[in-house]
């Protein structure tokens, strides 16, 4: 079964572009992941379904809240440069590292 990589951001718009780049990177290496972006407002619904959670730089301030809501889920914030470059490959590698893949 595919692991679920969930990204949270302010509105889910710019991060959806990064999600597409991550999907391309996963496909290029033959990896099967369920990758999606949501606004932080959907944390209670989408957080518990995630195998790993990545936070966009604009919601980094909410890291403690996310950790409290999903205490058993690996969590990291996406480095600003990685996010700014929309580096799907490196962001995917960050998620895989958290998954222990």
Image (cartoon, rainbow, N blue to C red):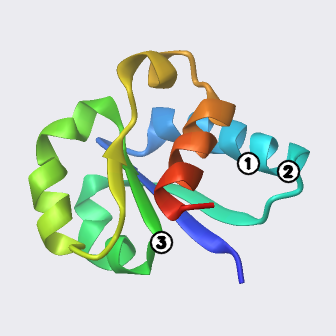
Say whether disc 3 or disc 1 marks the residue closer to the N-terminus: 1
Q: Residues within 10 Å of mark 2 (few under 14, many from 20)?
A: few
Q: Determine whether the residue tagged by mark 1 lies in a helix, strand or loop.
A: helix
- On screen, residue 93 above or below 81: below
- Disc ID at residue 82: none
In percent of width and height, residue 88 lies at 65, 34
Select label 3 or label 1 by which is in front.
3
Q: Which residue is mark 3?
A: 51
Q: Residues within 10 Å of mark 3 (few under 14, many from 20)?
A: some
Residue at 73%, 48% in the rendered image: 23
Callout 2 touching callout 1 (CB < 8 Å): yes
Q: Determine whether the residue tagged by mark 3 lies in a helix, strand or loop.
A: loop
In percent of width and height, residue 20 lies at 69, 42
Q: Which residue is mark 2?
A: 27
Residue at 39%, 35% in the rendered image: 78
Q: Which residue is mark 1?
A: 23
Callout 3 touching callout 2 (CB < 8 Å): no
């Amino acid at each position: 079964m595919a692991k679920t990589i969930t990204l949270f951001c302010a509105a889910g718009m710019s991060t959806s572009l990064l999600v597409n780049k991550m999907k391309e990177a996963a496909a290029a290496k033959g990896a099967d992941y369920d990758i999606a972006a949501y606004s932080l407002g959907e944390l209670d619904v989408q957080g518990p379904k995630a195998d790993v959670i990545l936070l966009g730089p604009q919601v980094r301030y909410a890291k403690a809240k996310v950790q409290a809501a999903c205490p058993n889920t690996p969590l990291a914030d996406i480095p600003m440069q990685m996010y700014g470059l929309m580096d799907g490959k490196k962001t995917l590698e960050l998620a895989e590292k958290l998954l222990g893949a």
